């Protein structure tokens, strides 16, 4: 079974004669471990399609007019808000187009990663796991240590 299957998705903004169809009959299928790229001109609906996978296009103003978004066989468009909270940041995560605007600069990145761990994997919500995850994406241990713990960068670099 495909991990993600979108069937004939249709999303509109506005209603009646002024409705604009942003996504018009998109279908795609993604197997676990594979990568799928959506390519299209600006305004063609790539972001709206991708955001709809975790129902992150707010409704209103959007209207999910038709189709299905099956995540491991479950239709996202039929999920309760509780079910949606469970998949967001767990089964479905995003690296947004402008990461600088997505992370809160007031909080260290370690605290922000831990927030998601607390919800989805509480037993792993600790500094060691945050550092392991940062190293997985190529952030070195010293830097990872600094972003997790409140230690000045020059102190760590001097070691
Ligand atoms: N909140 C909104 N209210 C009204 N229209 C919207 C909203 N969000 C997106 N749209 C419209 O939906 C259409 C698809 O937008 P979308 O952002 O998905 O395009 P895109 O393919 O990701 O473009 P880009 O390559 O510029 O990122 C556009 O016409 C856009 O104006
Ligand atoms: Mg976009």
Image (cartoon, helix red, strand yellow):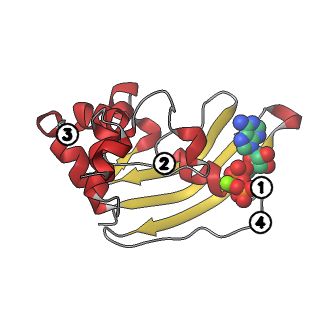
Separation of marks 2 and 1 at Cα, in angstroms:
18 Å
Give the mark nearer the N terminus: 2 vs 3: 2
Instruction: For residue 51, say whether it is visible.
Output: yes
In-image side of 60 versus 96 (left or right): right
The reply to whether callout 1 and callout 4 are in contact (CB within 8 Å) is yes
Query: Which residue occupies the extreme left position in the image?
Result: 123
Cβ–Cβ under 8 Å for marks 1 and 3:
no
Disc number lying in front (1 or 3): 3
Residue 127 marker: 3
**Can you name the residue that lies furthest to the front here?**
158
Q: Is residue 119 above or below residue 159?
A: above
Density class for disc 1 (Cα within 10 Å; few <14, some 14-19, many ≥20) is: few
Q: Kindly tell me whether mark 4's CB lies below 8 Å from ligand 1.
A: yes
Q: Position of residue 22 (x, y in %)?
A: 73, 49
SS class, disc 2: loop
When the figure is inspected, residue 37 is found, relative to residue 72, above or below; the finding is: below
Q: Gap between marks 2 and 3, in whole Å?
A: 30 Å
Q: Nearer the viewer, residue 68 or 86?
A: 86
Relative to residue 122, is residue 48 depicted above or below? below
- Contact between marks 2 and 3 (CB within 8 A): the answer is no
Does residue 98 appear to the left or right of 1 in the view shown? right
Camera-side mark, 2 or 3: 3
Q: Position of residue 143 (x, y in %)?
A: 33, 51
Of the pair 1 and 145, the residue shown nearer to us:
145
**SS at circle 1:** loop
Disc 1 CB within 8 Å of nearest ligand 1 atom: yes
Spatial separation of the CA atoms under disc 4 and disc 2? 20 Å
The mark nearer the N terminus, 2 or 1, is 1
Give neighbour class at mark 2: few <14, some 14-19, many 20+ (Cα, 10 Å).
many
> Disc 1 designates what residue?
43
The residue indicated by pointer 4 is: 41
């Amino acid at each position: 079974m495909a991990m993600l299957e979108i069937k004939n998705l249709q999303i509109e903004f506005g209603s009646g004669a002024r409705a604009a169809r942003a996504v018009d009959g998109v279908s795609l299928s993604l197997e676990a471990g594979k990568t799928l790229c959506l390519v299209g001109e600006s305004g063609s609906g790539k972001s709206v399609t991708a955001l709809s996978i975790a129902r992150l296009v707010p409704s209103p103003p959007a209207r999910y007019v038709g189709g299905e978004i099956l995540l491991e066989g479950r239709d996202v468009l039929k999920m309760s808000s509780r079910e949606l909270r469970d998949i967001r940041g767990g089964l479905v995560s995003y690296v947004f187009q402008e990461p600088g605007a997505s992370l809160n600069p007031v909080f260290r990145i370690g605290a922000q990663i831990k927030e998601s761990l607390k919800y989805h994997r509480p037993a792993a919500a600790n500094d060691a796991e945050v550092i392991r995850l940062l190293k997985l994406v190529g952030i070195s241990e010293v830097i990872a240590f600094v972003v997790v713990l409140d230690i000045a960068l020059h102190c760590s670099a001097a070691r």
